[in-house]
């Protein structure tokens, strides 16, 4: 070889060299060449181009994961032909893990791993290597990239994606029915050896289920698995790597398998014969009894339908299904009658609502049972022969006339007697009554069809032995018409005749009304009363259509001679017995124009037209008089109330306060009041009056002589009060109850002496006001005015 040739030597030390099996030498890829480079052409400047020679290159290193030795694990060696062993070449390593996971001896080029490596964390590392001059740091070789791959070892067991698994499979499934597929993963390298090759097996759950060793698909392994026998299964599946060989790692999971229900069980009655007892008083639509069929299935597969397939009482009963409980409810469709039929027999069938054709061979999915229904006797109220009664009676029927009858009987075997009565809430006026024994209805009062054409009453039937058993029936009584009313004018006619009227001129058309209602309809006849026919000024012409015309019998009328005419009109009907009445038609005489239009009527006619009759005027006058009397009475009561005492109760004691607006001139104003009058109370006795009532008459007061209040007798206040008490007791004008009397005398014997300033005129010289100066600044003005020496006041 040429000495200048650069040779890159990559050495993989086998584990056998280090005492560990499993590693062999890797072949090196070398590039060799002479010192001269081949001429490749020229650049743009004419400089010859030469191809550079690659000194060394390699592919990759391999390193075993999870190294457990005490020394650093040797990876490989870098070497350059430029390295003559004099220490001038420096090897540099960069890239993933350089300096931390991998270290290089910069002199020898040996590479070591400093830590244990896990392939599952990182499978390979990419690094870069170059050789440089140690002194000049110039690159001796170009930088090259190499890879360190981590060799896998079987250090991870398979792990299932779920734990536990939940699965359902229909009961009675065929062998090989898929249930669920389980999956386990192995973190080891699947491309290197069998470390990640997983094989599935079943540890628990045989012989019911099996598992495919490669796919992990669980299938049924036993036919006819019945949910009603066992519903839940626990299956344990194992996943083992190394293709299931000895020494491989394994993991397990639990699969909870539930058998879902299918309709493989028919419904069955718990009994073949059911018996129910029901009172005959049960209402239609009520429940008679409940039957139940059992079905081992659940949910929709246990739903069932009941129906009656045979009965000795068609249409008497029906059966429905309670969907929440799957019970059969027997319902009454017609009323029961113990006296008519005391027992019924039904044939009932139950069948699944949803049948799986796959299990027809396990049928039939139905069952039958017999139901016996016994009717119990109940004390029932009386029953009327009809639901209602209609009776007719003429309105002129006499009292106690029987108009019809009702009939009721006891439906029970004992056949108790029945007592009849009328519900008086339906006959408040007691127009009818009923015979208690035979139910005959008769009249108590006279009837009037025009007042009430129909009467609706309620008749009560009561058992004689059990008064609590009652029943009612409506009775409609129609009052038939009898011609008992005479026809009258249909309305209140306002008729007038013009003064210039001609003979035989129609001035009014009248008609009639009759409250009776004959079957053939009304037919009225009109005519003039016989007593007025000879001297009549008007005539009546019957129009034969239940109307008549009023005609004049002479030319011209004078309102001055007679302003109002009263024409008696006789109206009769054509029924039997014939009824007639005389009706008065009032005709006013008015002034009219040539066309016959009314222009003016006299005052009497206008008053009559306004409708203000003499009776109405009298009524208005009476109302005015009554109002005046009420006003007078009210005024008298108020006047009488003023005479009542002011004190109306023992507790109502009050002082009489008299206000004066005259303030007075002070102590020196002796002209403003009479001090002698205040000193002598007897001076005012003559003018003293009662202040609690309004005086009417005056009685001379009886008074005893009163001694003038001198300094000797001023202290005798007790005698003064007793004297006033006797005066009030003997006063005939005093009220008969306690009252409060006030006096203008206060006495002279008080320890505190008089507080009045009226006596200060005579006692000013005896007063000592020096104490006012001791009361503070508020009384300084008074102290200056009254608290000085006598010499000051005199001056």
Image (cartoon, helix red, strand yellow):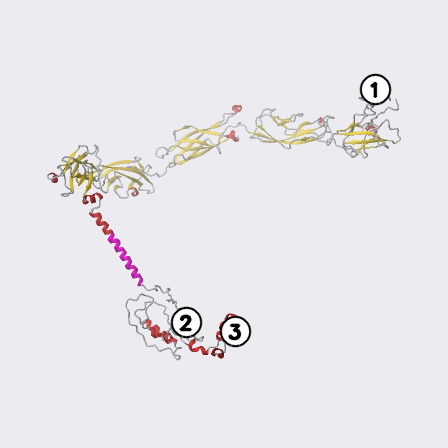
| Residue 575 visible to an observer of this rendering | no
Nearer-the-camera pick, 500 or 202: 500
Quarter location, residue 505: top left
C-alpha gap between disc 2 and disc 3: 29 Å
Mark 2 / mark 3, whichever is N-terminal = 2
C-alpha gap between disc 2 and disc 1: 156 Å
State yes or no: discs 2 and 3 in contact (Cβ < 8 Å): no
Nearer-the-camera pick, 377 or 654: 654
Q: Residues within 10 Å of mark 3 (few under 14, many from 20)?
A: few
Helix, strand or loop at mark 1: strand
Read off the residue under disc 1. Answer: 39
Q: Quadrant of the N terminus?
A: top right
Q: Is residue 701 left or right of residue 170?
A: left
Mark 2 / mark 1, whichever is N-terminal = 1
Residue extending furthest toward the front: 795
| Residue 174 visible to an observer of this rendering | yes
Residue 143 location in percent, x, y? Answer: 80, 28
Read off the residue under disc 2. Answer: 665
Mark 1 / mark 3, whichever is N-terminal = 1
Q: Is residue 35 left or right of residue 282?
A: right
Residue 774: which disc? 3
Residue 571 location in percent, x, y? Answer: 17, 37
Residue 668 location in percent, x, y? Answer: 42, 74
Q: Is residue 62 magenta?
A: no
Nearer-the-camera pick, 545 or 290: 545
Q: How many marks?
A: 3
The part of the chain drawn in magenta is: 624-643
Nearer-the-camera pick, 612 or 373: 612
Q: In this rendering, which labeled residue sits more in front, label 2 or label 1? A: 2
Helix, strand or loop at mark 2: loop
């Amino acid at each position: 070889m040429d000495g200048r040739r650069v040779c890159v030597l990559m050495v993989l030390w086998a584990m056998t060299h280090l005492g560990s099996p499993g590693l062999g030498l890797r072949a090196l890829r070398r590039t060799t060449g002479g010192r001269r480079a081949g001429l490749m052409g020229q650049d743009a400047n004419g400089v010859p181009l030469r191809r550079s020679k690659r000194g060394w290159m390699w592919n990759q290193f391999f390193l075993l994961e999870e190294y457990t030795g005490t020394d650093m694990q040797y990876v490989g060696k870098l070497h350059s032909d430029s390295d003559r062993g004099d220490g001038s070449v420096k090897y540099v390593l960069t890239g993933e893990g350089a300096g931390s996971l991998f270290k290089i001896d910069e002199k020898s080029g040996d590479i070591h791993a400093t830590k244990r490596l896990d392939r599952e964390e990182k499978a390979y590392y990419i690094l870069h290597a170059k050789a440089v001059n140690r002194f000049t740091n110039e690159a001796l070789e170009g930088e090259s990239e190499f890879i360190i791959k981590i060799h896998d070892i079987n250090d991870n067991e398979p792990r299932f994606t779920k734990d536990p698994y939940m699965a359902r499979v229909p009961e009675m499934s065929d062998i090989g029915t898929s249930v669920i597929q389980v999956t386990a993963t192995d973190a080891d390298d699947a491309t290197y050896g069998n470390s990640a090759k997983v094989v599935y097996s079943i540890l628990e759950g045989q012989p019911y289920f099996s598992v495919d060793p490669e796919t992990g698909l669980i299938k049924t392994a036993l036919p006819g698995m019945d949910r009603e026998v066992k519903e839940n299964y626990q299956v344990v599946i194992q996943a083992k790597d190394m293709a299931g060989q000895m020494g491989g790692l394994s993991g397990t999971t639990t699969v909870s398998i539930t058998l879902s229900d299918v309709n493989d069980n028919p419904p069955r009655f718990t009994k073949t014969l059911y018996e129910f007892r029901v009172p005959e008083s049960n209402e239609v639509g009520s429940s008679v009894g409940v039957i139940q069929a059992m079905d081992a299935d659940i949910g929709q597969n246990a739903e069932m339908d009941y129906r009656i397939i045979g009965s000795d009482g068609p249409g008497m009963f029906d059966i429905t299904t309670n969907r929440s409980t799957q019970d059969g409810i027997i319902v009454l469709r017609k009323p029961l009658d113990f006296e008519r039929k005391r027992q019924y027999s039904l044939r009932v069938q139950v069948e699944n609502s949803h049948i799986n054709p796959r299990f027809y061979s396990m049928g039939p999915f139905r069952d039958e049972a017999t139901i016996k229904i016994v009717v119990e006797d109940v004390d029932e109220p009386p029953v009327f022969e009809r639901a209602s009664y209609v009776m007719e009676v003429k309105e002129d029927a006499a009292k106690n006339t029987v108009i019809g009858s009702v009939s009721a009987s006891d439906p029970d075997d004992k056949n108790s007697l029945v007592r009849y009565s009328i519900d008086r809430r339906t006959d408040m006026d007691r127009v009818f009554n009923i015979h208690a024994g035979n139910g005959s209805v008769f009249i108590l009062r006279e009837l009037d069809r025009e007042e009430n054409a129909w009467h609706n009453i309620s008749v009560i039937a009561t058992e004689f032995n059990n008064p609590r058993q009652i029943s009612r029936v409506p009775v409609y009584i129609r009052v038939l018409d009898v011609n008992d009313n005479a026809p009258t004018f249909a309305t209140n006619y306002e008729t007038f005749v013009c003064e210039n009227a001609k003979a035989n001129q129609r001035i009014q058309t009248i008609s009639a009304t009759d409250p009776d209602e004959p079957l053939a309809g009304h037919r009225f006849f009109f005519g003039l009363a016989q007593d007025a026919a000879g001297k009549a000024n008007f005539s009546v012409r019957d129009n034969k259509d239940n109307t008549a015309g009023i005609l004049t019998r002479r030319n011209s009328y004078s309102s001055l001679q007679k302003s109002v005419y009263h024409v008696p009109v006789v109206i009769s009907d054509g029924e039997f017995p014939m009824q007639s009445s005389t009706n008065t038609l009032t005709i006013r005489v008015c002034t009219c124009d040539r066309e016959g239009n009314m222009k003016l009527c006299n005052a009497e006619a206008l008053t009559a037209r306004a409708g203000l009759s003499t009776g109405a005027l009298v009524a208005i006058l009476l109302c005015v008089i009554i109002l005046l009397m009420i006003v007078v009475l009210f005024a008298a009561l108020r006047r009488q109330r003023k005479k009542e005492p002011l004190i109306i109760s023992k507790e109502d004691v009050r002082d009489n306060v008299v206000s004066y607006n005259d303030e007075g001139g002070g102590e020196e104003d002796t002209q403003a009041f009479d001090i002698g009058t205040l000193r002598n109370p007897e001076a005012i006795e003559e003018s003293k009056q009662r202040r609690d009532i309004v005086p009417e008459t005056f009685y001379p007061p009886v008074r005893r002589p009163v001694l003038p209040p001198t300094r000797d007798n001023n202290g005798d206040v007790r005698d003064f009060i007793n004297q006033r008490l006797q005066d009030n007791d003997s006063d005939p004008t005093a009220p008969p109850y306690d009252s409060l009397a006030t006096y203008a005398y206060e006495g002279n014997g008080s320890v505190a002496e008089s507080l009045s300033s009226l006596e200060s005129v005579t006692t000013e010289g005896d007063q000592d006001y020096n104490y006012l100066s001791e009361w503070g600044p508020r009384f300084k003005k008074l102290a200056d005015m009254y608290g000085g020496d006598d010499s000051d006041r005199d001056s």
